[in-house]
Amino acid sequence: MSNKREILIIDDEQVILDAVSKIAESEGFKVDTVLNAKEALLKIDQNNYSTILCDIMMPEMDGFQLLDKLNNEHKNIPVVMITGFSTVENAVNSLYKGAVDFIAKPFTFEEIISAIYRAIEYDKIQLKIESDKKGNKESSVIYVPCPPRYKRLGNISWMNLETQGTAVVGATDMFLRTLNNVKNIEMMETENIVVQGNSCAKFEAEDGLIHSCLAPIGGRIIERNEKLLTDPALLEKDPYFKGWIYRLIPSDIEYEMKYLIPCSSDRM
Amino acid sequence: MKSKDFISKIGLKLIVAVGIITIVIIGAFSYFSIQAQSDALLSQAEIQANKLSETIKNSTYSSMLQNKREEIHTIINAISQETSIREIRVLNKEGRIMFSSQNDLIGKMVDKQAESCYACHTADKPLERLPINERVRVYKIHPDSSRILGVINPIYNDESCWNSDCHAHPKEQKVLGVLDVKMDLTDVDRQISNSEFRFIIFAIIAIVALSFIIGFFVRRWIGKPVKELVTATNQVSSGNLNYTIKSLGKDELGILAMSFNNMTKKLAEARMQLFQSDKMASLGRLAAGVAHEINNPLTGVLTYSSFLLKRTKGNPEVQEDLQVIVRETKRSREIVKSLLDFARQSVPKKQHADINEIIEQAISVINNQLSLKHIKLEKNLDPNLPQVTVDTNQVQQVFINLIVNASDAIEKDGGIIKISSSSISLSSFGIAQIKRAVCPKRHDLMDNEIKIDGLPTIKVKMKSNGEEGFMNLDPVYGKHRHQFGIEINKGKSVQVSCPKCSTSLINEDKKCPECNSAIFSFEIPSQGMFEACTNPDCGWEKWAEEDDAGNKEFVEVKISDNGCGIEKEDLAKIFEPFYSTKGQTGTGLGLAVIWGIIDNHNGTINVDSEIGKGTTFKIRLPI
């Protein structure tokens, strides 16, 4: 089945390669591992990987450089960034540079496997779009891009500034499509502080996997969408309006905006 | 105790000075009063002698007229029995001694230059009339004999003389002879020397008494406080900055002691900030490195254990143990994450912000918590605060942490937390620090190896006397703690150039306004030029941009509580990482993080605390 897809894991630590490949293989994926980014580039040229898991801090060539290189060569392979140096900057920078996800070391089995599944799904969606384009088919609605005045953090979450200075945040349709029907949502309480690039909500999918939604901006939660708790399907039905997650007071909007991608660019 | 301690050196100097003054005053006083006394005694003796002389003249008058020489002899001898009278004699006009109380002298001639004669015989022609005050003379026969007062009384010719029967004196003769009375002044001299002796005794007693009084008070008012100050400076110089001088009163030394205490307190704070700065920087690097390294093995543990947990669902015994491993590894993950958070504050994302707004936001976050604990919050915010450039998140975190700490310190009801903000202005002297410096060819002049007071210095090449070496300039504007690699000649200018490209830094167009030597200058990127005199003794420096900025403005925020307070021993350590008094509930990073944040904003944070009364944190942020 589709689970025969191949994953490339890049890390300069053997134990990470062993652990991640064991997990991925247990789920039926084919796994390839390399210890540095240069070799990885060679392998990427030769093989057709569905997903790449890549460490950021590596000798010689780091994860960001690899990401840039892949972008320049228009290799449309979803990359999940992994790092032991899990700073906010690393997280948002990864997503800004086109990574589909960001996982901080150390991670659990569940965390890495859900990320792999999302990345695989993302790849499938991309392939479908491409094949639709090639076949000149009237592209069926595969996913809904976010409204033009919104801004998004990678392909994971969106935010919309309101006139009174507050901001509404939610998950993008693309993110929701990569998980298998949300059946449960775990949200933070109001008055809590969320940090950009850190997990702000957990979605439990029907397959039992738990997916973390990374916050597009940081700030203090002043309101949360209580309806989602009783009706998680609302999230997928109307991800950009009725399916909002939090309303918050941004803490440092000017700085954090730099790492957000305007949704208006998606339609060009 | 040695006598050196007993009378301190100031005391000794004061005693010598006062002693000299006393001697001069008493000396002058004694001189004049002894002089007056001796004049009075002498004139008394003169009067007495004159009277005596007249008496003799009168009592011998009739005998002389009748030429009864024996009678005259008897009278003179009788009168001269008086002890104070040394000799009575009568001389005739030629100078022959006609009568004398000393019989062996009778008939002898007297030299007209002798003491008794020169009053009249100094001029060529002898005087015929002698004024009464010139009849007296005081002289000594030998230098060591007692003084003698002599009174001459001329015997004038008289009608009865030339009319008498005997007789020999012609009418034309004006002066017939001289009656000379010599009186011994031993008594008078003894009286004078007696009073001299009394004055000397008085002077000695006065000086000794004054010395003791001065010595006592100097010891009490100067010696003791100075000793206490010396002990304090020794303590401070040996590193004990917690030493305080107990109150020394309100005089100048008391004020000195107070400002000394104030200085050591400020010094301790500055040293703490510096220590902390260094420690934080290295700890930050360490934490980042450790976090990265530890996360890899932790990933191994966490992935395998969580994987096993999934695969052994049917085995509850193993599951339980595995859950512990997963849980504890996750806990390690959180600890490492807090370490990383701590290390990461190095780059604040700064923007213009209103401190009051940040305070209000911080309060709104924790207000619920405070009202649950029945803690009253008193705000005293200055509405006219200037904007500051800060990382709002970080600064808000600082306020939240400090308020939470304050509420933790309050154990009983009736707790009050006070928050105030104000703007203050501090002089930039000795504060402004040169952080970057480049030569005209853009070579970096900063030197991280040689530090002055913990700060990197500016390194330039210098040439003096044909020798070449390096000079490290004090990065703090106006402090002049430069270090010279080679010996410098007093008052002589040095050549200054870039240590990398040897481009001269001398500015030919300008002269030092203070000593007219050449000046050198270098650029402080985006902060103008720094100029200084090439003469090391002059010390003229100018950083125009900094001068124009004038006093440094700060926003000061105080957060105080009336809680349990902090022990003095703990106070010095609270900003250290991993120092916690909260036991299991804290990581001990809170205040260290706060400190790091404020330091990254070039601000300062101080704490004052008193057990049982409360704690005040004072934060200053530059505008």
Image (cartoon, grey):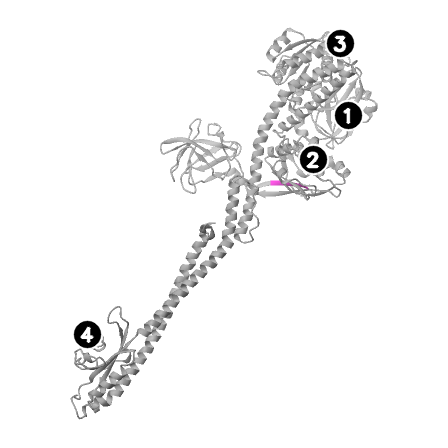
Residue B97: x and y, percent? 19, 80
Q: In this rendering, do the residues under marks 4 and 2 share a single chain?
A: yes
Q: Amino acid at mark 4?
A: Gln
Mark 4 Cα within 10 Å, few/some/many (few <14, many 20+)? few
Q: In this rendering, do the residues under marks 4 and 3 share a single chain?
A: no
- Residue B84 higher or lower than B18, as above or below: below
- Element marked by disc 3: loop
Over which residues does the magenta segment extend? B554-560
Circle nearer the N terminus (4, 2): 4
Residue topped by disc 3: A137
- Element marked by disc 1: strand
Rounded to the nearest angstrom, the CA distance separating label 4 from label 2 is 116 Å
- Mark 2 near mark 1, Cβ–Cβ under 8 Å? no
The chain ID associated with circle 1 is A
- Mark 1 near mark 3, Cβ–Cβ under 8 Å? no
Image depth: mark 2 or mark 3 in front: 2
The chain ID associated with circle 3 is A
Rounded to the nearest angstrom, the CA distance separating label 1 from label 3 is 40 Å
Residue topped by disc 1: A187
Q: Amino acid at mark 2?
A: Ile
Instruction: Say left or right for B256 vs B126.
Output: right
Residue B620 in sight from this viewpoint: no
The chain ID associated with circle 2 is B
Magenta segment: does it hold B559? Answer: yes
Residue topped by disc 4: B113
